[in-house]
Image (spheres, rainbow, N blue to C red):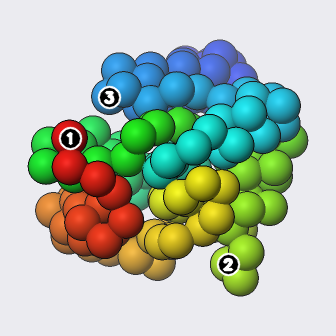
């Protein structure tokens, strides 16, 4: 069997994109879209998506299920590391003090970073632990629905 790697990866990427969009996140593919989204007033959760196993098995499910909470961000957005490189780089420029990490989550309030969940906070952890980290950040920085 001869499988075209690019064909396979395109399918993996498409599924990873669809999964986070179906959870209610707006996909940002350009630096301009990132700038506009982060400039919005209120709280914005940025999910840095990727194709790795911890993104699919932990981060994306946590991103979806963490939203079932009394407090949550005003805006939900996502960039895709390794795919939409310029958009991801622009988003990461707001994550001051943190090295590039994917998957990861950044919670911003009025464009300023207030909480960060890095790959090492995700990889090797159960989805419920990541959900709790996200909801703790929501509790501290977001308003009641």
Q: CA distance from mark 2 to mark 1?
A: 29 Å
Q: Pointer 2 and pointer 3: residues touching (CB < 8 Å)?
A: no
Q: Report helix, strand or loop for mark 1.
A: loop
Residue 49 screen position, x and y as percent: 54, 45
Residue 80 screen position, x and y as percent: 64, 39
106 left or right, relative to 100:
left
Question: Quick one: label 3, few (<14), some, or many (20+) residues within 10 Å?
Answer: some
Residue 11 screen position, x and y as percent: 54, 19
Q: Is residue 144 visible?
A: yes
- Residue that mark 2 sits on: 98
Residue 52 screen position, x and y as percent: 51, 51
Q: Is residue 83 visible?
A: no
- Residue that mark 1 sits on: 145
Placement of 119 over or under 111, stated as above or below: below
Q: Nearer the viewer, residue 41 or 70?
A: 41
Q: Nearer the viewer, residue 61 or 139?
A: 139
Q: Nearer the viewer, residue 62 or 114?
A: 114
Quarter placement of the C terminus: top left
- Residue that mark 3 sits on: 23
Q: Report helix, strand or loop for mark 2.
A: loop
């Amino acid at each position: 069997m001869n499988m075209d790697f690019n064909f396979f990866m395109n399918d993996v990427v498409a599924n990873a994109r669809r999964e986070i969009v179906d959870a209610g996140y707006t996909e940002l593919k350009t630096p301009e879209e990132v700038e506009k989204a982060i400039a919005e007033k209120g709280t914005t959760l940025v999910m840095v998506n990727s194709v790795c196993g911890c993104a699919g098995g932990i981060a994306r499910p946590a991103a979806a299920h963490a939203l079932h909470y009394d407090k949550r961000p005003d805006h939900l957005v996502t960039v895709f590391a390794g795919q939409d490189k310029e958009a991801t780089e622009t988003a990461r420029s707001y994550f001051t003090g943190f090295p590039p990490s994917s998957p990861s989550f950044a919670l911003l309030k009025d464009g300023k970073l207030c909480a960060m969940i890095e790959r090492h906070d995700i990889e090797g952890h159960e989805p419920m632990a990541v959900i709790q980290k996200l909801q703790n950040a929501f509790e501290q920085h977001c308003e009641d629905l």
